[in-house]
Image (spheres, rainbow, N blue to C red):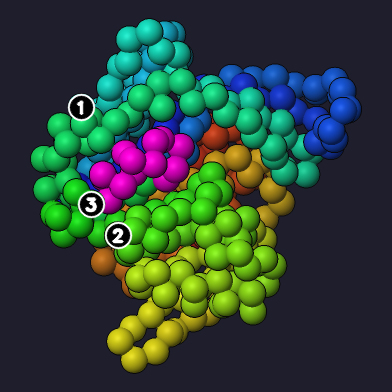
Amino acid sequence: MNKLLVIGSANADHVLAFDSLPQAGETLLSRDYRLELGGKGANQAVAATRLKSSTQQVDFICALGDDGNGELMRKAWQKDELELSGCYGIAGQSTGTAMIFVSSSGENSIGVVAGANACLSPEHITEQQDKFAQASYLLIQLETPLDTVLAALKLAKEHDCTTILNPAPAANLPKALLSLVDIITPNETEAQALTDIKVTDTASAAKAAEQLHGYGINTVVITLGSQGAYLSVQTTKEIMSELIPAFAVTAIDTVAAGDTFNGGLMVALDEGCSIKEAVIFANKASAIAVTRHGAQRGIPYRAEVTNERTV
């Protein structure tokens, strides 16, 4: 059994739907409200679990509060057969919470309260080092403390585990942390935060990718929304790059699009796909996700992605 490891946040998402997103100082009546299970870490773990093959297992390390939302998440994840022995319950803390505003076009604005996510510590990571020793890939984001992210990346490198960093939410990260990353997957906003280069097209994505390569990251995948994903791989001799187009779909909710992409990318790479093949698989999974409402609720299963008629 091939082990894959995801570390990150878990949030209860309170989703409000609008015709258009509220502007500063504007009050709008929501067309709909629902509670969804989310958080970048949990979304990516669920995506990897649903997209994996029968020979793969996904472990998830996270922190939940001692409340009803935390228990709700555990029960839902168990149905997806996500391995939860690294899931910590933090006494006196609420489970992470997000307020998500979604427009009729599928765009979103999100505000997050960290809650128990802020309590996931380097000590928790050390306690789970057996998982690092068994894992072939680590996928991690930035909704948990930065020192915890750094500890996880260091431990992964010690165990020859390939590291994938989804640098979200956007942040200017220390070079010492970036040097531990094998594959980085920013969107346009996150790439700009890392490089100070405004990314809008393939030319600007190439400049941002070149700078990220300079930090020691060999593989850069910059997601460009409906344009697709810009892939740049640095070898000993040259940089090879190309834009891998997105699948054309009508988006209604983009909340978990990037998370689905990252989970799919890790699964495909672990199966032995080339990086280009993995990006295509991840693009397809993400394309399906944006045609559905919800974060984890909208993440597709493997059979849907491998069916050529799904997008």
Q: Which residue bears the numbered disc 3?
A: 154
142 falls in the magenta region: yes
Q: Amino acid at mark 1?
A: Ser
Disc 3 + disc 2, Cβ < 8 Å: yes
Secondary structure of the residue carrying numbered label 2: loop
> Which region of the structure is painted magenta?
141-153
In the picture shown, does residue 287 fall above or below 228?
Answer: above
Dominant secondary structure (helix, strand or loop) of the stretch shown in magenta: helix
Q: How far across and how far down the image is residue 113, in percent?
A: 54, 24
Amino acid beneath label 2: Leu
Q: What mark, if any, has residue 252 been given in the picture?
A: none
Tell which of 281 and 233 is nearer to you: 233
Determine crowd level at label 1: few under 14, some 14-19, many 20+ residues with C-alpha closer than 10 A.
few
Which residue in the structure is indicated by mark 2?
180
In percent of width and height, residue 54 lies at 23, 47
The residue type indicated by label 3 comes to Lys
Is residue 93 visible in the rendered image? The answer is: yes
Structural distance between the alpha carbons of marks 3 and 2? 7 Å
